[in-house]
Image (cartoon, grey):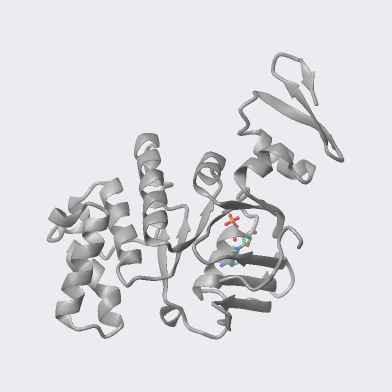
């Protein structure tokens, strides 16, 4: 099995390419297979193609080549609202003219659910994020963290099996961010949902994920559990990128086979 294979996972990118201008590929021959219930993070520098991958999975962008499969089905031509995917994006704002309850009921309404079932689901989703008492507030009457919790509840309200999150905590301060990371991880584990998470924050990726896909220039450079990225970076890009967040304050000097040489801030060189 290769590092980023396109086997029979719950979510599969099978030789996916994307070009916005018909010339430059911003996603290059991407193979990725994600198991049901997994928390996979796409991590990498700005412009490396992470959001484009999430947008293709969500259905807001079409792959130029290749196939995206969900639970064994090719979804290339399935519109976003028929994919059954929950989404939390940093800029995926709540509707300002609707109350919290109405915001949460919206995706259920779109799916034609009756009012009484809607009420039950909305209440349950709000309880999940401990926001039940805010049901009649409008988004402007909530803090940033509370709004983000409501966005999370809205993504979960219709019991999706897959939730996509693109820098969902980017606008929050450090303390709230760490708290929300814990809550997201807890929800992921208790609900057994599959999560595909995009961030450029290594700390976030490494603490939350079952596996991390390190992106650079439209390709996955390495797909591995966090520990493995630290211990066995597959190339100098990953070593350098992960090294920036490493416990040892130092820089990777060279990578030769299994040997990684690091120059510590003290000047000492370790291999
Ligand atoms: P990341 O999420 O890693 O920051 P993106 O997927 O947003 O990367 O962007 C990858 C590349 O595609 C960048 O060069 C970006 O400028 C380009 N890009 C992203 N969205 C569009 C778009 N809607 N139209 C044209 N180019 C885009």
| Displayed quadrant of residue 117 | bottom left
The x and y percentages for residue 127 are 21, 57
Q: Is residue 56 left or right of residue 83?
A: right
Q: Would residue 74 appear left or right of 112 to someone viewing this image? A: right
Looking at the rendering, the quadrant in which ligand 1 lies is: bottom right
Quadrant location, the N terminus: bottom right
As drawn, 239 above or below 67: above
Q: Residue furthest right?
A: 256
Q: Is residue 124 visible?
A: yes
| Residue drawn at 59 percent across, 77 percent down | 69
Q: Is residue 171 visible?
A: no
Q: Percent from the top left, x then y, of residue 82? A: 43, 82
Q: In the image shown, does 25 or 13 lie closer to the viewer?
A: 13
Instruction: Point out residue 209 in the picture as x, y percentages from the top left corner.
Output: 53, 50
Say which quadrant the C terminus sits in. top right
Q: Residue at x 67, y 43 (%)?
A: 229
Q: Position of residue 192 (x, y in %)?
A: 42, 62
Rendered residue at 36%/55% (across/down): 187
């Amino acid at each position: 099995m290769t590092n980023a294979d396109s086997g029979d996972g719950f979510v599969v990118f099978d030789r996916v390419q994307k070009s916005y201008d018909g010339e430059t590929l911003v996603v290059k021959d991407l193979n990725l297979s994600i198991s049901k219930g997994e928390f996979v993070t796409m991590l990498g520098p700005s412009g490396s193609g992470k959001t484009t991958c999430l947008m293709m999975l969500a259905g807001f962008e079409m792959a130029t080549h290749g196939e995206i499969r969900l639970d064994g089905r090719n979804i290339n031509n399935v519109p976003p609202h028929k994919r059954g995917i929950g989404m939390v994006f940093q800029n995926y704002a709540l509707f300002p003219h609707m109350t919290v309850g109405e915001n949460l009921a919206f995706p259920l309404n779109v799916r034609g659910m009756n009012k009484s079932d809607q009420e039950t689901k909305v209440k349950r989703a709000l309880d999940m994020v401990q926001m039940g008492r805010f049901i009649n507030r409008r988004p402007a009457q909530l803090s940033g963290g509370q709004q983000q919790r409501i966005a999370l509840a809205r993504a979960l309200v219709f019991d999706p099996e897959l939730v996509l999150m693109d820098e969902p905590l980017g606008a929050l301060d450090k303390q709230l961010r760490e708290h929300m990371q814990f809550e997201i991880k807890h929800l992921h584990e208790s609900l057994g949902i599959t999560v595909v998470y995009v961030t450029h924050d290594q700390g976030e990726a490494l603490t939350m994920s079952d596996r991390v896909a390190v992106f650079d220039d439209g390709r996955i450079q390495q797909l591995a559990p966090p520990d493995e990225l630290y211990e066995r970076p597959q190339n100098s890009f990953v070593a350098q990128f992960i090294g920036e967040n490493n416990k040892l304050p130092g820089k990777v000097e060279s990578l030769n086979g299994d040997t990684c040489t690091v120059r510590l801030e003290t000047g000492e060189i370790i291999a």
